[in-house]
Image (cartoon, helix red, strand yellow):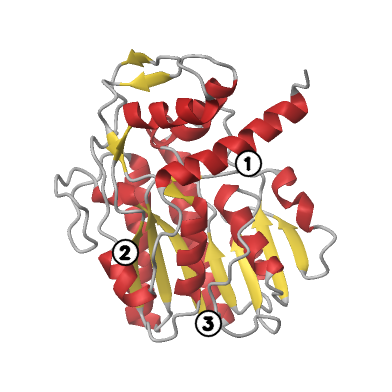
Amino acid sequence: MQLKKYHTGSISNCSFLVTGGAGFIGSHLAAYLLAHGAGKVRVLDNFSTGSKANVAPFVQNASFELLKGDIRDADTCERAMQGIDYVLHEAALGSVPRSITDPATTNDVNITGFLNILTAAKEAGVKRMVYAASSSTYGDSKELPKVEEHIGKPLSPYAVTKYVNELYAGVFAKVYGFNTIGLRYFNVFGPGQNPAGPYAAVIPLFMKAALTNQSPKINGDGLTSRDFTFVDNVIQANIKALFKDEISGHEVFNIACGSRTTLNELWRYITDCAGINTTAVYGDERSGDVRHSLASIQKAADILGYIPEVPVQQGLNITYQWYKMQYDVHHPV
């Protein structure tokens, strides 16, 4: 849990809604707010991908409230907004492959659900909403590093939904004067990310392989690169964005480390953490994937004061130690 303080003053009189708060990033955000004395932290989650284990540490906290519900239901969203000052919107159906398999459900959750939350927040008079945007919005743009103002055409249904979120947020700012900030996450990883299921992200899958001394599958030649971002950096960005009063209307920021790591390098770093010498196996390139991704984080640095404090290799070591602890608990010698 991130304990470093990224806001000024007290938040004891503030109420927060974290949608998707039982998920990976959402639960880290809820933990930060509760650790720093938030007056109320309400989590909205339907537990389709979130976990009750992620919110279990909060249930004895008097400031914590759990609302089970689906963002696709407008009445649920309205109920969730009652008495809320700030919204951190993390609820979404992630995964490019999932969106290719089932574009309709991805659309319902990520667009209809987003619009429901946006509308409910605006109607409730929420002060600001910070939402999870995505680096997938850059699509087929070959420009490196990725700069907020220059995007390409989407390469997957998931990318379409995340871009539509930005369009809606921009329109709500212009038409209704509702303040929103979108954070384009670049491949977030860290403790608590689920390695199970058909749509698990690459780092938890690699962690699972390292712990069991198995060979992970790499799609393509392993030279695909990503700007992997440790979750504590993402928490910093969310909190700074939430309380950046000087920003009005709608803004979008890249949130990353500003460095590239290939999948081959990623596996090597993780095997170093684990002290093993296992090689990967290689398969076909994955449909809808971007070949290379690297963020310019200059805008976030200049306006939000965002500085990624945990580099990739340090984050991987922290993450590996967490997975190892979980593995040791469930697989005692």
Residue 321 found in image quarter: top right
Q: Position of residue 126 (x, y in %)?
A: 55, 80
Residue 19 found in image quarter: bottom right
Between 251 and 61, the residue placed more toward the observer is 61
- Horizontal arrangement in the rendering, residue 161 relative to residue 75 (left or right): left
Depicted 110 relative to depicted 299: above or below: above
Residue 169: mark: none
Q: Position of residue 105 (x, y in %)?
A: 48, 41
Mark 1 belongs to which amino acid? Ser
Residue 127: mark: 3
Going from N to C along the chain, the mark reached first, 2 or 1, is 1
Q: Secondary structure at mark 1?
A: loop
Depicted 232 relative to depicted 119: above or below: above
Asked if residue 276 can be seen in this view, the reply is yes
Residue 167: mark: 2
- The residue under label 1 is 48
Check whether the beta carbons of the residues at disc 3 and disc 2 lie within 8 A of each other. Answer: no
Q: Residues within 10 Å of mark 2 (few under 14, many from 20)?
A: few
Q: CA distance from mark 3 to mark 2?
A: 20 Å
